[in-house]
Amino acid sequence: MADTNSRQETGSSKLREWMAFLFVIAVVVPVLSVAVVGGYGFIVWMLQVFVLGPPGHGG
Amino acid sequence: MKIISTLWNTLKRPPVHISLGVIIIVSFIAGVIFWGGFNTAMEVTNTEKFCVSCHEMEDNVYQELQETVHWSNRSGVRAICSDCHVPHEWTAKIARKMQASKEVWGAIFGTINTPEKFEGKRLELAQHEWARFDANGSQECRNCHDYDSMDWELMSDKARRFMKPAAERDQSCLNCHKGIAHHLPEEMNKGGNPLLADLLNDATSVSANKDTPYYSAESVDLYRDAELTELVGHLTIATEVAVLETQGGSVKLEIPGWRKEKGFGRVFYEDFGQNITNAVLDKDAAQDESLVATRERKEDDLTGLPWAKVTAELWAKKGAYLKGRDALWDTASEIYHDGCSVCHSEPDPEHFDANTWPAMFSGMVGFTNMDGPTQSLVLKYLQKHSSDYVDDGQNVDDGQAAER
């Protein structure tokens, strides 16, 4: 009885582990990366609009 | 909430069931796929097919490009949209991609979805690109075209005469080659100077108040009536006026000035004794006392000419007046510097007095490519910054300095 229970638990924790791993790899990290790069681009754009002016020679 | 806490509980512990090796390999592959996907997305959004998938681009600028040398030429090299319009350097490129969110906005809300709307915005859009090319010295042109690789011997004489000095000064290509890939804005096809058109963009709405000075951002036609049917003269650029009344698309202007009391008094000047043109009226209007009121009379000892201080009240169109003259003078100063320094270092405006400048200027202006309206702005700038208006290095721009 206790044996089946622990096997069941093992099974569901294994599933959970895989789900979490794949979710992070396929969704969280890509979304964060795009958000970070996009955010960086947005900040540079806003700087160009308000502070730096259009991108110039090498900078 | 429960899902997130379960996820977090799973993530914060070392894995029990997945081996470290599997994690490393799967993560590595996912990283490769992400990197590849990211770059592919960057490249796809840089293709011409992607750009012209919006009909705004397809129907306007893409068609215009096809008439130019950047579309077909004897060597079979051609430029696609992104070659010229997307910076190649990484940071600037990402910033430009984010900037495209504004283009998505425009596509969704139809900012330029008809040919008329597109033409209406063309000057503004073009000016954004020109400002960018100006700041980076036309870097995107020079990714292909290089001054160092130009063979002067192979150029026509005419081309060499312009290109060689440009190369020496490392000039930005778009300084001269505007409109090389797309049509020029309508304002420019009329022969107008884009810098002057730019000034008009800043023209503000006016409020009728006798004490608020406005300055004309272009030469404005003057009419006897509010319906603007009877043309009686014109106001020159950068002239101070006051708005007495507004009616529909028209404004009633009060134009102050001085004129010579010889002949018909058709020309209004800005100050006593100074030949700085403010307005030119036709003969009948100039003599019409219901339009022109005389305030004061004074004789110029230098020339023996009698002058009269006058004001005219005439109608003109709306939308051509600025709150100050700084933008006008900045533009004029830039044009003056650019036009003259091609051949020689330009004299300071205060090197001559206001009445000497017209002759000096007309003797030299033929060597430049300034059009009529530009010439009158630059001349007025020079006269208003001449020795008559400079006091101890300080420019006195209120018309008081002319009391000689």
Image (tube, helix red, strand yellow):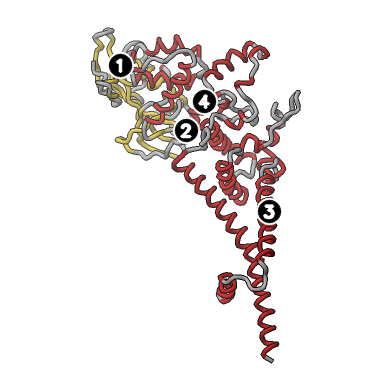
The x and y percentages for residue B203 are 44, 35
* Residue receiving disc 3: B32
Q: Quadrant of the N terminus of chain B?
A: bottom right
* Residue receiving disc 2: B200
Residue A38 appears in the figure: yes
**Mark number, residue B193:** 4
Mark with earlier residue (3, 4): 3
Mark 4 closeness class: few <14, some 14–19, many ≥20 residues within 10 Å: some
Q: Marks 1 and 2, how far apart in space?
A: 29 Å
Tag 3: amino acid: Val
* Residue receiving disc 1: B387
Q: Marks 4 and 1, how far apart in space?
A: 28 Å
Do discs 4 and 1 belong to a common subunit? yes
Query: Viewer-nearest of labels 3 and 1?
Result: 3
Q: Evaluate if marks 4 and 1 touch, with contact meaning CB atoms under 8 Å apart.
A: no
Tag 2: amino acid: Leu
Mark with earlier residue (4, 1): 4
